[in-house]
Amino acid sequence: MTKTIYSKDHKFLVERLKKARIEENIDQKKAAELLGKTQSFISKIEAGQRRIDVVQLKEFARVYKKSLSYFIKK
């Protein structure tokens, strides 16, 4: 079994997170401020170097004004 960060589903999630942020016209620094995180945290997630849990995904969805289903591969 491959590690989660190397899965196609994780890659899809990462791409959707970045796309949602760009669609909201928010840079990584602003996203980090809105989430109470560092810009490095956002960068590592978008680079696929860091896993994201459901609670964090819920916060990203709130900040990016997307439904949770937007980030889930169908």
Image (cartoon, grey):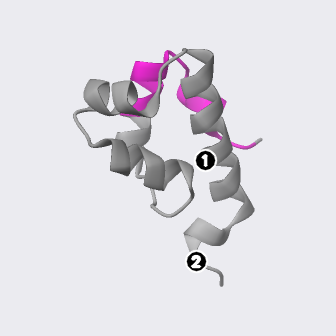
Does 47 appear above or below 60? below
- What residue is drawn where x is 54% and y is 30%? 68
- What residue is drawn where x is 29% and y is 24%? 34
Considering the numbered disc 2 on the image, is that residue within a helix, a strand or a loop?
loop
Residue 59 x %, y %:
36, 31
Residue 61 x %, y %:
47, 26
Residue 16 x %, y %:
65, 37
- What residue is drawn where x is 62% and y is 17%? 23
Q: Which residue is mark 2?
A: 3
Q: Is residue 41 left or right of residue 33?
A: right
What are the residue bounds of the magenta stretch? 59-73
User: From this viewpoint, which residue is outermost toward the right?
Assistant: 74
Earlier-in-chain disc, 1 versus 2: 2
Please tell me which residue lies in front, 72 or 44. Answer: 44
Amino acid type, residue under disc 2 in the picture: Lys
Q: Quadrant of the N terminus?
A: bottom right
Q: Is residue 46 left or right of residue 41?
A: right
Q: Which mark is residue 14?
A: 1
